[in-house]
Amino acid sequence: MTSQKAEKKHTLNATGSQSLFFSSSNICEFSSVLRDVQAYISSNYAGLITDGGKDEIKAQTKRYIAKYIQDNRTSVSGMTEQELIDAIYTEMAEFSFLTKYIFGEGIEEIDVNAWDDVEVQYSDGTTKKLDEHFESPEHAVNVVRRMLHVSGMVLDNASPTALGHLSKNIRIAVLKTPVVDEDVGVAASIRIVNPQSMHKEDFIQGGTATEPMLDFLSECLRYGVSTCVAGATSSGKTTLAGWLMTTIPDSKRIFTIENGSRELALVRRKDGKVINSVIHTLTRDSENERQRITQTSLLDMSLRFNPDYVVVGEMRSSEANAAQEAARTGITVLTTIHSNSCEATWRRMVSLCKRAVDMSDETLLAYVTEAYPLVVFCKQLENKSRRVMEIMECEILPDGTRNFRPLFQYHITENRMENDKFLISGHHEIVQGISKSLQRRLLENGMPQNTLKRILSMGGVS
């Protein structure tokens, strides 16, 4: 009992040391200290690390690290005792220097181009090369393997590519040799998708869209017009789609489907109670076919939950066909897709649908334009600002032909560089009003006459 108290007092003194650089007679390289501590922990307390990062286990592990450092009078030049303990722990049980960026504020993406080339993209669009890097290609591979272990993925010569997740909002894509050069070690893209509580004013003040554009989209969605938000990665399409869903009345039932990690946070509470009706779901990847949960299977499942709205986080493959079928059966669908223009979006939907069904392009184009009368195209400009570049309607004429009608557009009036910075100016314009067929559809879905008149007054009656 006495020895336990002595050890506890000893370790508390170790972790609570306030000295700037602790007294020691054994100054070592960090890598050698790490190896020695890993051997010590593995030999004496192996179960701790494998149990994961629970707070109690984390604190206990750090106490054992501190005990080893104190007992061996070990130090690393330029590091306090607590800094050394923290650094050793994060190398052993977390993700090396990446940990503070992965769980930091305001970071959207971490790109590992090579073991000695890492850059971070912040939520304001800026990108920064880090001075920090891994110690070697092997070190980079080992850290990334720990990340993939969370989602049960293996990275080795037989499986040199992997897609995994660290949590419900952090996804990771990885390449290792022989897909990348041996001296690179590993290439990885870590995408941190934090649900954001954006308000209409944020989009307006940031220049993403105008108030009439946002009102138009929210009213159309409210009254049953399925919409696709298109754009490249980091164009702001998911953020816009997420805000649109917050404009839906609490009485409407929403079913969301996302790929592996969650970007949408639509549940609303008041006085401790949930006031709306939302079911958030995630796909699950697995090498075992029976354990894999796809967007298509979740789309089929969603129909059994009697939803008013189905949100498909991002269409990438054959689920596009199930989504357009749902939209044509009366369910309002909001989805996002990678595309480079409004018109190209419908064509891309056709190519994705063909992965599920053997139909002509003409037939599928008729289906997807009926399913999604509206497409919104978002883009991140060279100065990193995000803009809704166009809102387009696909009008179905009485003879069955299609007419692509641009409703709103963003026009760039100036684009130049000054002191290595892009200076871009422009403005949004109303091009024309919605078609008669869309007007009828909105009225049939319950839109009040005065609301429709307000929408028509923006662009004139067509």
Image (cartoon, grey):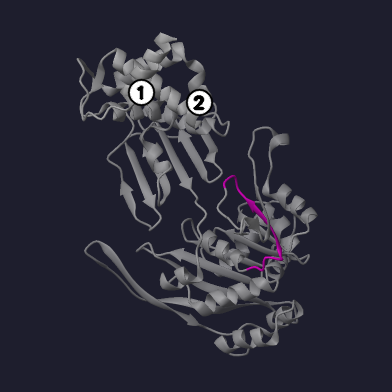
Q: Is residue 357 visible?
A: no
Circle 2 sits in a helix, a strand or a loop, which is it? Answer: loop
Q: On the image, which quarter does residue 94 sit in?
A: top left
- Of 456 and 412, the residue lying toward us: 456
**Picture coordinates of residue 53 (x, y %)?**
49, 30
Q: Which mark is residue 183?
A: none
Could you classify mark 2 by the number of other residues whose Cα lies within 10 Å: few (under 14), some (14-19), or many (20 or more)? Answer: few
Does residue 89 belong to the magenta stretch?
Answer: no
> Compared to 7, does 252 lie above or below?
below
Q: On the image, which quarter does residue 74 sit in?
A: top left
> Compared to 372, does 232 lie above or below?
above
- Of 344 and 100, the residue lying toward us: 100
Of discs 1 and 2, which sits in the foreground? 1
**Picture coordinates of residue 290 (x, y %)?**
73, 35
Q: Residue under circle 2? A: 157
Q: Is residue 284 visible?
A: yes
Does residue 255 belong to the magenta stretch?
Answer: yes
- Quarter of the image containing the C terminus? bottom right
> Compared to 92, does 462 lie above or below?
below
Residue range of the region highlighted in magenta in the rendering: 248-261
Q: Residue under circle 1? A: 12
How far apart are labels 1 and 2 at the CA level?
44 Å
Is residue 226 found left or right of 409 in the rendered image? right
